[in-house]
Amino acid sequence: MSENADFGPLDEAYDELLAREAEAVLAAGGPTVTMAELLARLSGERGPVPLDG
């Protein structure tokens, strides 16, 4: 791929997909977490974060 490849449209489509999935989870009464909890879980610094809110 070129160094100057434009991934803007791909990024926008991925963001839209994630937003739709999140809306579906919330509509079904699914769990939520704060951004801080999510980042901590992804980085593994604070151990697992329960997904029950």
Image: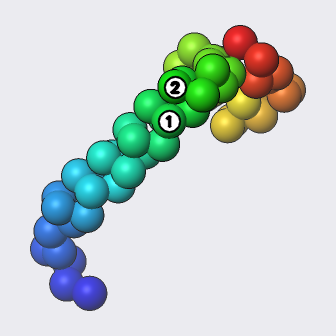
Crowding near pointer 1: few (<14 within 10 Å), some, many (20+)? few
Does residue 38 appear in the picture of this structure? yes
Does residue 46 appear in the picture of this structure? no
Q: Is residue 10 above or below residue 51?
A: below
Q: Is residue 51 above or below residue 21?
A: above
C-alpha gap between disc 2 and disc 1 = 5 Å
Residue plotted at (26% across, 87% down): 1
Residue 24 percent location from the top left of the image: 50, 36
Residue plotted at (15% across, 68% down): 6
Residue topped by disc 1: 24
Residue 43 percent location from the top left of the image: 69, 35
In the image, 49: left or right of 15? right
> Callout 1: helix, strand or loop?
helix
Give yes or no for contact between labels 2 and 1 (Cβ–Cβ under 8 Å).
yes
Residue topped by disc 2: 27
Q: Nearer the viewer, residue 25 or 14?
A: 25
Residue 40 percent location from the top left of the image: 68, 25
Residue plotted at (60% across, 28% down): 28
Residue 38 percent location from the top left of the image: 62, 26
